[in-house]
Amino acid sequence: LYSATYYDKSTGTDSFTMGLKAGTYYVKVANWTGAVGKTYTLRVDRALARASISTKAAATYTGKSLKPSIKVKAGGVTLKKNRDYTLSYKNNKKVGVATVTIKGKGQYAGATRTCTFKIVPKGTAVKSVKAGKKSFTVKWKKQSKQTAGYQIRYSTSKSMKGAKTLTVSGAKKTTAKIKKLKAKKTYYVQVRTYKQVGGKNYCSEWSQKQKVKTQ
């Protein structure tokens, strides 16, 4: 037997939430005087259906199956893996969107939820930036696995505000010349990898900034 008292003055309603095993329960509601009211039949709503699920927004490609940690909270309680639920992964190796299926067990048996996370290419690093007349040439490390090309962004602001971006197709390319710049001006440069999957670009983190002053 479980009993609770609850009253919400703002709505004039009584309610409470509790974790129960799946099944049919019987409920009696009593008013403040203790008089027993009508008997209701309660069907347990498996809390997993309304649980909050959190995981990494993105993981970096490694060539292996990726299984970032998953946190599941239901009714304010953090559920335990393999006791309250199990996990299965799909499309979690290559760049793109991976799917995680959370299947309830024990008192959460019969309920299933899914969430997703992105897999992005491994990043690269700038090897050198050479100044030219109103231009500069940037070289970076090749990153060919699960990579379709590179993006170079540059700005006169260290915060990269107002940065312009150049896309270089082809994973084997490792150099690009940026022209039509201001003379004797300092520019900050970064490079990242990308791959397009299903019409959408998946990009690595930007490399560390390098600076160069044009001639």
Image: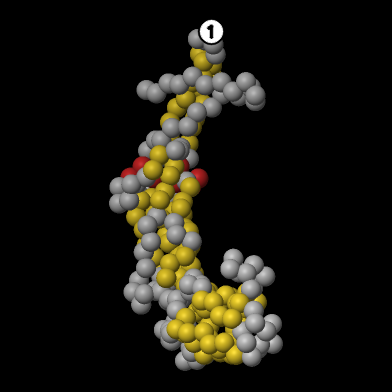
> Circle 1 sits on which residue?
33
Vertical arrangement, residue 186 with respect to residue 52, above or below:
below
Residue sitting nearer the eye, 91 or 200: 200
Residue at image position (64%, 67%) is 161
Q: Position of residue 147 (x, y in %)?
A: 47, 83
What residue occupies the far left of the structure in this picture? 82
Residue at image position (43%, 44%) is 73
Vertical arrangement, residue 211 with respect to residue 53, above or below:
below
Q: Position of residue 187 (x, y in %)?
A: 60, 77
Residue 199 in view here: no
- State the quadrant of the C terminus: bottom right
Residue 39 in view here: yes
Instruction: Tell whether 137 sits left or right of 74.
Output: right
Secondary structure of residue under mark 1:
loop
Question: What is the three-letter code of the residue carrying label 1?
Answer: Thr
Residue at image position (46%, 51%) is 53
Q: Residues within 10 Å of mark 1 (few under 14, many from 20)?
A: few
